[in-house]
Amino acid sequence: MGGSIMEELFNVERMEKSIGKAKRRSTWRMIFISVAVILTLVIGGAVANHVITPRLAFPIEVSFMHFSQISGPNEFIGIIETYPGILGGENYYKKYKWIEGKLVFTGEDGYGYGLFRNERLGRQGRTSTMHFGGAFTQENIHYTHYNELGQRMMTFFYPQVQYENVNDDLTYLQDMPDEKLVEMALSFDKGYSVDKALNLIPQELTAAWLWVNDVTEDAELHMREYVDKEQVTGSPLVRSANTVYGFSLLESDGEAKVKPAQQFISSIQAGVPIKSRWQGEFKRLNETIAGKDGELVVEDIVINGAVVTGTAKNLRQLQELPFIKASSLGIVSDRYN
């Protein structure tokens, strides 16, 4: 009988050891499975993110590059820094201008893309007590407007609007040394075809950029104001350098561009189908410039003005030319500094 009791005790101990081993095996198995699942999810997620994020970025990047081709007078995109994240990312870029063969840095900006990022990088707006940013109405032209680097921002005046006053910044050239490098926005007295506009610019100057008309209704040329709940014609509008559309006559390396007007049209048409923050403007420009037939061709383009560069001495020949309605000074620089 005693032997039976001892045998039962040994059996219980063996069972407990077996159960303990089984529990440990089960625990290690669960740990192994959990680690394997986590590694699979992490690696699989990283691989999936590596594949998906570029696909989210590509259409926004394409849309941005097309938009930069039709905006930013005499301004080019330089270095672009990309920061991909989880199902999205952010791109930051630097801007520059060519002023008579000299490269001038004009600032930087960025945009976001993806499922968890706003294309405006969450920016709701900018405020300042100084005159940063462009002019928008006739009243604003009494002040000089600057970008964040303290460089002058050019203002453009509609040919079809009668203003009480316009900028005549060509007069500043008299006070500049002859060799100064100057950027100047010219607003024309009326709309011209592309070829005619180019023929207006003296050959000694560099025609850098052409401003394209994108307004067809008179109501779009004035502020919307209300008196006793009735809409009335408000102050005449002007366009700042960051709101006008047009196309560069130069490539990003400063060389002359081939068929620039056609490239302008191609950029608009390429941007129309892409869903982005700029899609609405691509559609509006395509419809407005194309006219009633809906087919945008070079002959539909009306040029309201231009941006030219040259030395102060050469630019003085523009004074008193009849086709210039207004002039707005941009960047002024020394050739070697």
Image (cartoon, helix red, strand yellow):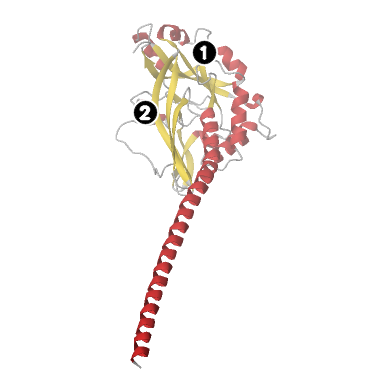
Sequence-earlier tag: 2 or 1: 2
Classify mark 1: helix, strand or loop: loop
> Which amino acid is tagged 1?
Pro
Foreground residue, 292 or 10?
10
Q: In this view, does 267 lie to the left or right of 221?
A: right
Give the residue type that dot 2 points to. Asn
Does 182 sit left or right of 287 as displayed?
Answer: left
> Disc 2 designates what residue?
147
Mark yes or no: residue 256 visible: yes
> Which quadrant, please, contains the C terminus?
top left
- Graded by Cα atoms within 10 Å as few (under 14), some (14 to 19) or many (20 or more), the crowding at tag 2 reads some
- Expressed as whole percent of the image width and height from the top left, the position of residue 90 reads 44, 40
Which residue does the numbered mark 1 point to in the structure image? Answer: 322
Q: Residue placed at 58% from the left, 34% from the top?
A: 285
Q: Is mark 2 on a helix, strand or loop?
A: loop
The quarter in which the N terminus is drawn is: bottom left
Q: Which residue is drawn at 47% across and 10% down?
A: 318
Residue found at x 35% / y 79%: 13
Q: Nearer the viewer, mark 2 or mark 1?
A: 2
- Could you say where residue 116 lies in the image, as x and y percent from the top left? 45, 49
Task: Please identify the residue farthest to the right as the structure is shown.
Answer: 293
Query: In the image, what residue occupies the spot 68% across and 33% down?
Result: 295
Image side of residue 234 versus residue 256, left or right: left
Q: Position of residue 293 (x, y in %)?
A: 70, 34
